Amino acid sequence: MTIEKPEIQVVWLKRDLRLDDNEAVSNSLNSGKRVLLLYVFENLLLDDPHYSERHWNFVRESISDINERLKPHDSKVLSVRSEIIQAFNQIQSLYAIDTVYSHQETGIEVTFERDKRFKRFTRNNTFDWIENINNGVRRGLKNREQWFEYWNAYMRSPKFEFTPSEGQLLTLEEIEAMEQLFTLEDLNTADISSFQKGGRTMAWRYANSFFETRHQEYMYNISKPEASRESNSRLSPYLAWGNVSVREIFQRAKDVKAQVKNKRHLSAFISRLRWQAHFIQKFEMEHIMEKASVNKGYHVLKKPISEEYQKAWKTGMTGFPLVDASMRCLIQTGYVNFRMRALLVSFFTHILWQPWQDASQHLSKIFLDFEPGIHFPQLQMQAGETGINNLRIYNPIKNAKEHDPDALFIKKWVPELAKLDLRFVHEPYLLTPLEEQLYNFKLGVDYPKPIVDINANRKRASDILWKMKIDPVVKEENRRILSKHTLSNRNRMLRDDD
Ligand SMILES: Cc1cc2nc3c(=O)[nH]c(=O)nc-3n(C[C@H](O)[C@H](O)[C@H](O)COP(=O)(O)OP(=O)(O)OC[C@H]3O[C@@H](n4cnc5c(N)ncnc54)[C@H](O)[C@@H]3O)c2cc1C
């Protein structure tokens, strides 16, 4: 006699680590059937060079936060270390799976291929896999007709509620019985860390303080490496890992904006929420961007690899204080503001003349908020290889003087310069031998000499890249990219929210 296995629905949590406004969770609960919440720490991703331990700790903290919320429901997330198909095979040894729910992931090639394998697996096992739209990004679009209208309607639509019925979620006892089959993931992380802590509780702490007071300086400080740490929302890791939905933040921002006098700051913030989806949508429609420039005209650009330059950049030892401070700060905290990210990429690709592909994994590993759909398009845009965007070759000295005029940021992250007078903190190579003696500081010993001639290298990059802009293939590709990825009224993307 065969014993019938109990039937369940499974929510496969990915980069949507929350219960509220989570369509996958809501759809599973609406089925009225019993529900298991699952997160798989996939070896495939743990071993992937785009990721590092800081990401997995963020995920662990996010799941612990969900588990706290699930306590009154006598449930938790089944958190295991496995490959995804293996995990589902194990679950099927105890339960009959009816449907799996997850969000549509706009990810790197390994997750795209894994999803294709999983699709075949679901067909062979005759259960359904329902994927929902994530943060307004749509699969299978051919162009951006109506995209803005669609995004806007999505962001204004009602949020999904988390309202499980009594006993609907698998109980702790049932989950613990299942755990016997798996290698479990330890969700504990160090109490003290220099990174933003994961989880919805922390996400709302950041969001609340931003909407209450911090946003008042948002646009004044957005380019300043030190002050922006306080007055930017700092929501990026929470949005990237889905501790909050963009819709939740959008709706809250709209409400607050309606109440405040100076609307400029929140308008600019809301625009950036739209850019979030705009970039991810571009990557969704142009997967080649993980490995090659979206504009095929730039594929002929070959840059000589310099291990020495790359190492100096990766370790914050280039001899350019703002570049080094930004890199060291990223390594330590997982965060720098937009302009410093752009500066780091411009320095690597223009001044050091290295291919953006060689910067990609180092940065994704240290950005706590690594979001493939923003990361790759931004890298190429800052490298000047899209053809359609303005070419910006950042001058690290000028930027340091403009955006870190008192060198607070530089002194914090490059402490070996802290004892110097302000003008030498910005340009330590201006010290004369006598001044070096006075400061008891030796350039080349205490801090590196500039590894390249900045003016000559800026000119080289500018000459080559401007010339390429008029290359026929680049121009032809520009037309293709514009017709596929820009809105019929392009200014809509660029203007502040109204
Ligand atoms: C080379 C490069 C790589 C980047 N990689 C990432 C990444 O992996 N993940 C990531 O979230 N952001 C990335 N960004 C965009 C941007 O720098 C960060 O989103 C921002 O600094 C995060 O800080 P915040 O949350 O305080 O932003 P806020 O200014 O408070 O903005 C709110 C949210 O809007 C979105 N956003 C803000 N700026 C942009 C932008 N320029 N493009 C798209 N979305 C934006 C983010 O989700 C952000 O959390 C990258 C930028 C560059 C130049």
Image (spheres, rainbow, N blue to C red):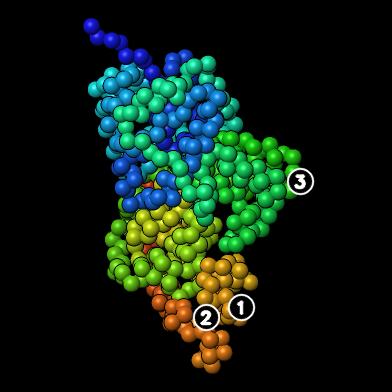
Comparing 377 with 411, the one in front is: 411
For residue 428, the mark is: 2
Rendered view: 195 above or below 166:
below
Residue found 57% across the figure and 50% down from its top = 234
For residue 383, the mark is: none
SS class, disc 2 = helix
Residue found 31% across the figure and 63% down from its top = 301
Comparing 278 with 196, the one in front is: 196
The image quadrant where one finds the C terminus is top right
SS class, disc 3 = loop
| Few, some or many residues within 10 Å of mark 3 (<14, 14–19, 20+) | few
Q: Position of residue 25 (x, y in %)?
A: 47, 26
**Left or right of 357 in this view: 257:** right
Residue type beneath disc 1: Leu
**Left or right of 54 in this view: 398:** right
* Residue, disc 3: 261
Whichever of callouts 1 and 2 sits on the residue coming sooner in the sequence is 1
Asked if residue 135 can be seen in this view, the reply is no
